[in-house]
């Protein structure tokens, strides 16, 4: 069962932190809506590793696709996204 507490409970943060366990984060709410999660450090490290592995796998799929099917020119990508290719490149 998830542990959900109002953010105001942080006044007694030692009690809130005591509820954080591996595999069981504490979710904090403000005005009844979720706004924060406090997670065990081991869970955070695991999630970070898994996310980085996922990003690497996606980049590898993109690289293989580009090699097999050809690359899309940068300007074409920008046009399809509706952005100016000169913005944010440091060329200004």
Image: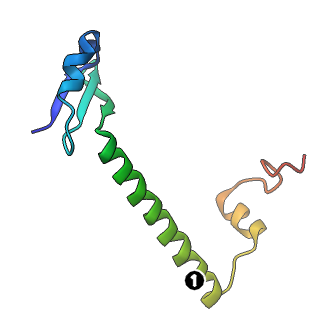
Q: Identify the residue shown where x is 57% and y is 83%.
A: 65
Could you say which is closer to the camera, residue 16 or residue 69?
16
Q: Secondary structure at mark 1?
A: helix
Residue 41: horizontal and vertical position, in percent?
Answer: 33, 41
User: Would you place residue 78 above or below residue 9 in this image?
Assistant: below
Q: Residue furthest top?
A: 11
Q: Identify the residue shown where x is 23% and y is 31%.
A: 26
Q: Identify the residue shown where x is 67% and y is 86%.
A: 70
List the residue tagged with mark 1. Answer: 65
Indicate how the structure is coloured in the image. rainbow
On the rendered structure, is 3 left or right of 48?
Answer: left
On the rendered structure, is 39 left or right of 83?
Answer: left
Q: Identify the residue shown where x is 72% and y is 61%.
A: 78
**Quadrant holding the N terminus:** top left
Could you say which is closer to the camera, residue 78 or residue 16?
16
Residue 16: horizontal and vertical position, in percent?
Answer: 22, 21
**Residue 5 position by quadrant:** top left
User: Would you place residue 6 above or below residue 61 in this image?
Assistant: above
């Amino acid at each position: 069962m998830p542990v959900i507490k109002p953010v105001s409970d942080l006044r007694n943060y030692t009690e809130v932190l005591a509820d954080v366990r591996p595999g069981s984060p504490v979710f904090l709410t403000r005005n009844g809506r979720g706004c924060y999660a406090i997670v065990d450090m081991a869970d955070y490290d695991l999630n970070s590793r898994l996310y980085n592995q996922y990003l690497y796998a996606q980049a590898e799929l993109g690289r293989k696709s580009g090699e097999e099917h050809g690359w899309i020119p940068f300007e074409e990508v920008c046009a399809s996204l509706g952005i100016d290719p000169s913005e944010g490149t440091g060329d200004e």
